[in-house]
Amino acid sequence: MPRIRSRRQPFPAPVGEGARRVNASGSIIERLNNASDNENYPYEFSQCTDEVNRYDKDNDLDITFTGRQIELATGHTMVGGDDIRFNNRYLSGFHRVGTHNSGMTLLVPSISSVALTTLARSNPTRPQVSVPNFIYELKDLPGMIRDIGNLKRQLQNTRKKGIQQVTAKNSASHLLSYQMGWAPLIGDLRKLLDFQAHVDKSMRNLQGLYNNGGLQRRVRLPEWKATTHEVRFSSLFMESGIHTGIRCRSEAVSTIERWGTVRWYPAGLPDPRFSSKDMAGLARDIAFGVHRPTIKQLWDAIPWTWLIGWFSNADDFMQAHSNTIPLTHSTPCVMTKIETRISYERADSQDWLKGGRGVVGYSTKQRRTNSGSLSATIPFLNRRQLSILGALAIQRKR
């Protein structure tokens, strides 16, 4: 029967005498490095929580780690007749539980979105270039060529007559012709020229599916990573009671990253008469999208679906469920890793005290299983997308 297991492993802080203040009247105030400090705020601490005795699927997992690198405070001074001594004091200002900068998970796509993209990007039957869509889009080639001729004539008239012939609307039309026509066409031609590498990749995927009992795939994307910086305290009091003039500036840098993994399996073994030549032919057809028509190819042929793809993960949904050979897959696992480095630098003028600065590292690692789902978002559009939307808006003006 499955059960939740949690393991904790603290590493105590170094032992020192602490701090002492002896008043002129003889009364003593002490702040010692005691056992509770070591237990509650150890130099290093790790905890792992997972599920055991479950063999039919992947389990959730949580790992937390805190590590401190502290320069213990040592020094001696006299203040108003009071004798103040620090001897390897673990300053109380470091007695803080590690936390990440706020809003980190909002900077990357959601777990369900990452799971769906993982399925789409790792699908072994995903074509490198869709030849049917490439041929279908060649119908726009005559208009694209005419657009180049129009641009050439406008530039020639501008030089001869000295009158600006390239208007804002003409510029918008030329930009759309390049971004929506020529750029994708040139990209597909490059992929077609490198056809052997794509066929070899598809061949390796098929061999892994049928010969190794399935494919383990990991998907990592640059847009699934983000970093933030914030000032936690500009002047943090590090020790109360003994000396209130010890202060630190505290800053934190947090980094988050998500990635996904999934296993693909063949729904059935190929026909025993399926030769290596047949396998190579299937790999070629898959690489160029000519094995069987898929819902993703039909979707790409519909006008304006690219705009829907900007504001939703509809493209990933279509690709994840477009299998040209019978396949099954495990439930995707989405990993989230957040690392935070909190620095403490002295921000006072107490030259008699040495140490009292340090760094606290705090990291959390999480694994969650998720099947992925359709979602709509308001994304951060890049320059290319903004230029296309701007060109469309200019063309709509009369």
Image: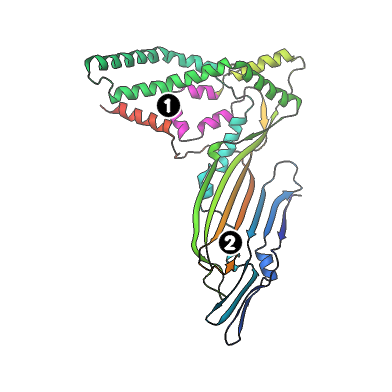
Mark 2 lies on residue: 357
Q: Which residue is mark 1?
A: 304
Q: Amino acid at mark 2?
A: Arg
Query: How far across and how far down the image is residue 266, in percent?
Result: 70, 27
Q: Name the magenta segment's main secondary structure.
A: helix
Question: Marks 1 and 2: in contact by CB < 8 Å?
Answer: no
Q: From where the camera sits, is residue 319 visible?
A: yes
Q: Earlier in the sequence, mark 2 or mark 1?
A: 1
- Location of the C terminus by quadrant is top left
| Mark 2 Cα shell of 10 Å, populated few (<14), some (14-19), many (≥20) | many
Q: Is residue 87 above or below residue 330?
A: below
Tell me the mark number nearer the camera, choosing from 2 and 1.
2
* Closest to the observer, 222 or 372: 222
Residue toward you, 363 or 119: 363
Residue at point 55% right, 20% down?
129
Element under label 1?
loop
Q: Is residue 348 above or below residue 300?
A: below
Residue placed most toward the observer, 246 or 379:
246
Which residues make up the magenta segment? Answer: 295-324
Q: Residue at x 56, y 16 (%)?
A: 192
x%, y% of residue 289? 58, 19
Tell me, yes or no, whether the highlighted magenta stretch contains residue 305: yes
Q: Position of residue 65 (x, y in %)?
A: 66, 54
Instruction: Residue 313: say if magenta.
Output: yes
